[in-house]
Structure formats: structure tokens, C-alpha cells
Image (cartoon, rainbow, N blue to C red):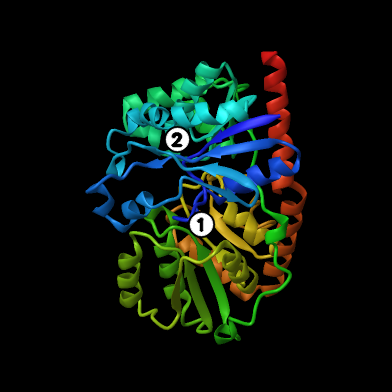
């Protein structure tokens, strides 16, 4: 079976972390015998756009193609606008940017189906390709389409619904997303299939390195995310401030970068937490896993989480995790069993959860062990690939 994957979210020399979960799925599919080629469109950045920001400059110097861990990945350019201007029409522009490359690829790689990750713009471009080559389209919704894009404009919502209606099957990564699709897009319950993301067993570290000696004797709380408002990093800071007298040996490590960093630094000064908080910045995925193995508690009170691979990465390392009620993580974080769920945007609820884990180390360890078992049994990329291939086969059999 040959599959063409379309995903603007994919690791590259520009960003080694972005879309790593899609790459992990692709590798698992390849391991199961599926032949895959990936098209990862990037914004076209002619002069002077390539000088607007460092981000746009990096787009301009990305390679046209690379072999990433055995996977053939193409990075064609399409017209995109800063700040997601005219986003509703982005799928049509993506199609125009990739159609010649797809024609070239098809000469030697006659794919059986197209799998697009996110509906807009990738899935919309996928519709055009599916119509041209008379191939079935499958789309995976990871969160942004249903949690943000459908609320951008009526046209954006309409185009996403068009992708869902056209696709043979729509994969969603959590029950939360399925509920949103049913509520706001009136998607048929049978059209959407929940296939959760997973973890790469090779990423699980048996032990950490010796690079964390400066934190020995500390109670380490960790978060890993983009530094944006919805991730709730500020809530962690406020909760720690309430507990600092009781637990003076706590250290909070923050991995990630983002537009909220300056506000968070200001908040740290206001709360007098300078000696208890450290920004690690962006690090490799391997390094992230080292920090996870080393930490005592993983806390990310994000109130807009479609799934959250980083939670299961912490859980499989035997760490107690804290997340928010009502989010995608409820599929695998069962309160007081495999983690703790707190009220969204509620500092008191979060403070109570941190206090409980810090003062009940045996219970925290038991929660972490239960979490590890649950992930190993249900949330690996191998299991994800098996479920995805089953969908592929059913779709192709129906087509034929």
C-alpha cells in the first residue's frame, strides 16, 4: 500500500520538534510495511518577506527535499500570509503550490490514498488531489481545526466542513474533538473515528544523564509546551508562589519558547520566584525526555488541549501528571488513578493538586506507575499505526 501524506506540520531543519507526532506515526506505518512519501508545504518567502522575521527567513532557506529517518519528505512552497491573513483560502493556495510536485511524484510513486493532517489548509488541498487522481482522502484532526479555525470565520468553518464531508473517514485524536465535530459541524458520528496518538518506545529513557546535579535534593516540577496563554504556565507560577513557604526546596523547570515568555518573566519577579524557576528554552526531543525522567511532577494546566502527547510521555516515564478537566487528556488521565485533573484557570485547584503530590510521595509514585502501565497498554505508535492501517484497508476496499 502506498500513501501520500500532506502535512505542513512536520519536522525540518527549520524546526526539529514541530509535528514530531506526525513523523512518529509515519515511521510506525513504514515499520508495518506501508510505503509513504510526505509533502510538507512551507510558506513562499520572496524578498522582502524573507526579511520580516527570523521565522520567515528560515522558511526561505529550507531544503526542497530530505530523507528523514528513512522517510522521503518534500518541502514545496505555497503562498501564505503572515498572521494567518486570508486563512480561509489557504487550502486552494496550498494546492496550487504543490500540484506540480505531486504530478512529478506520481510518475514513480502511484499512491493508493491521500492522508492529510489538519483539514485546513492540508485537507482542502487534499480534496483537489483526490479529485485529480481519483484517490480516497483521509484527514486527521489534531485540534486546531475544531478548537480554533472553525471560529475564525464562516468561510473557514464552511471549508473545514467541506473537507470532512468529502473525506472517506475523519480521524480525530480524542473524544473531545469528536464531540466538537458533532456539535459545531454536525458531522455524522460514524464519519469520525478516534485514534489516539502514541509514544515511541525508543524514546523511553531508563535513566537520566548526569547533567542535572544542580537540582539534586530539589522537588522538580516540569512543564513542556509553547509559551502561550492557553498552556497555563502562569497558573503554575501562581500556585508555586502559594506553596513556596511550605516547600522551599521546589524548583520549577520550563521547557519551551513563545510570545508569553516576557510576561512570565515579569510575573516571576512580581511573585519573587527568581530562585525557584528556570527557563530551559527549546531543546531536542531526546533532551526533553531526559528532563521528564528527572522530574518529580509534570504539570501543564492547559485549558485547550486536544490530546497532548507530552502528557503520555511523562506518564510512560512513571511521573504523576496534572492537567485540566474537560480536555482531550481525559481519555487517558483518570483522576487520582493515572494523574490529577484540576479545574481550568483555577489556581486554587491547581495549588491543591501540587500540594497533594508534594506531600504524598508514595501516592504520587503509585499514580505514576499506574499511568505508565496504562500508556504501555494503549498508547504506542505501533498501536496507532495498526488502527490507522485498518482504516486505510476499509476505505480502499470500499472504493474498489
**Left or right: residue 89 compared with residue 1:** left
CA distance separating discs 2 and 1 = 23 Å
How far from the left and from the top, in percent, is residue 357? 61, 69
- Front one among 41 and 160: 41
Identified at 31% across, 30% down, the residue is: 153
Mark yes or no: residue 184 visible.
no
**Left or right: residue 84 compared with residue 37:** left
Of labels 2 and 1, earlier in sequence is 1
| Category of crowding for the residue at label 2, using alpha-carbon neighbours closer than 10 angstroms: few (below 14), some (14–19), many (at least 20) | many
How far from the left and from the top, in percent, is residue 243? 48, 76
Identified at 50% across, 32% down, the residue is: 180
- Front one among 303 and 63: 63
How far from the left and from the top, in percent, is residue 238? 41, 68
How far from the left and from the top, in percent, is residue 273? 39, 79
Identified at 70% across, 57% down, the residue is: 371
Quadrant where the C terminus sits is: top right
What residue is pinned by disc 2? Answer: 145
Describe the element under mark 2 as helix, strand or loop. Answer: helix
| Category of crowding for the residue at label 1, using alpha-carbon neighbours closer than 10 angstroms: few (below 14), some (14–19), many (at least 20) | few
Quadrant where the N terminus sits is: top right
Can you tell which quarter of the image residue 393 is in?
Answer: top right
What residue is pinned by disc 1? Answer: 16
Q: Nearer the viewer, mark 2 or mark 1?
A: 1
**Left or right: residue 98 compared with residue 332:** left
Amino acid at each position: 500500500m502506498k500513501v501520500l501524506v500532506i502535512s505542513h506540520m512536520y519536522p525540518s531543519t527549520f524546526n526539529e520538534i514541530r509535528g514530531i507526532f506526525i513523523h512518529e506515526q509515519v515511521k510506525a506505518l513504514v515499520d508495518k510495511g506501508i510505503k509513504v512519501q510526505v509533502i510538507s508545504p512551507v510558506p513562499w518567502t520572496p524578498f522582502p518577506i524573507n526579511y520580516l522575521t527570523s521565522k520567515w527567513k528560515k522558511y526561505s532557506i529550507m531544503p526542497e527535499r530530505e530523507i528523514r529517518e528513512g522517510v522521503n519528505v518534500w518541502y514545496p512552497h505555497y503562498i501564505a500570509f503572515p498572521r494567518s491573513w486570508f486563512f480561509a483560502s489557504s487550502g486552494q493556495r496550498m494546492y496550487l503550490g504543490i500540484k506540480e510536485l505531486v504530478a512529478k511524484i506520481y510518475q514513480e510513486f502511484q499512491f493508493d490514498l491521500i492522508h492529510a493532517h489538519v483539514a485546513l489548509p492540508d485537507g482542502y488541498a487534499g480534496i483537489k488531489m483526490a479529485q485529480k487522481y481519483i484517490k480516497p482522502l483521509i484527514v486527521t484532526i489534531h485540534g486546531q481545526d475544531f478548537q480554533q479555525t472553525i471560529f475564525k470565520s464562516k468561510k473557514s468553518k464552511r471549508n473545514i466542513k467541506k473537507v470532512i464531508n468529502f473525506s472517506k473517514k475523519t480521524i480525530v485524536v480524542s473524544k473531545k474533538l469528536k464531540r466538537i465535530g458533532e456539535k459545531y459541524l454536525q458531522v455524522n458520528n460514524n464519519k469520525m473515528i478516534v485514534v489516539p496518538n502514541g509514544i515511541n518506545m525508543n524514546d523511553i529513557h531508563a535513566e537520566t544523564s548526569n547533567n542535572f546535579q544542580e537540582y539534586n535534593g530539589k522537588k522538580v516540577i516540569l512543564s513542556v509546551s509553547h509559551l502561550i496563554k492557553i498552556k497555563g504556565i502562569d497558573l503554575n507560577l501562581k500556585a508555586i508562589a502559594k506553596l513556596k513557604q511550605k516547600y522551599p526546596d521546589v524548583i520549577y523547570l520550563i521547557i519551551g519558547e513563545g510570545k508569553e515568555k516576557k510576561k512570565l518573566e515579569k510575573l516571576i519577579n512580581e511573585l519573587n520566584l527568581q530562585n525557584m524557576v528556570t527557563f530551559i528554552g527549546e531543546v531536542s526531543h531526546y533532551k526533553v525526555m531526559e528532563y521528564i525522567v528527572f522530574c518529580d511532577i509534570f504539570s501543564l494546566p492547559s485549558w485547550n488541549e486536544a490530546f497532548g502527547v507530552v502528557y503520555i510521555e511523562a506518564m510512560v516515564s512513571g511521573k504523576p501528571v496534572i492537567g485540566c478537566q474537560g480536555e482531550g487528556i481525559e481519555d487517558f488521565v483518570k483522576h487520582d488513578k493515572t494523574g490529577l485533573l484540576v479545574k481550568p484557570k483555577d489556581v486554587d485547584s491547581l495549588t491543591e493538586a501540587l500540594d497533594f503530590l508534594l506531600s504524598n510521595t508514595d501516592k504520587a509514585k503509585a499514580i505514576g506507575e499506574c499511568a505508565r502501565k496504562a500508556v504501555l497498554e494503549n498508547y504506542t505508535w505501533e498501536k496507532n499505526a495498526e488502527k490507522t492501517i485498518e482504516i486505510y484497508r476499509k476505505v480502499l476496499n470500499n472504493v474498489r
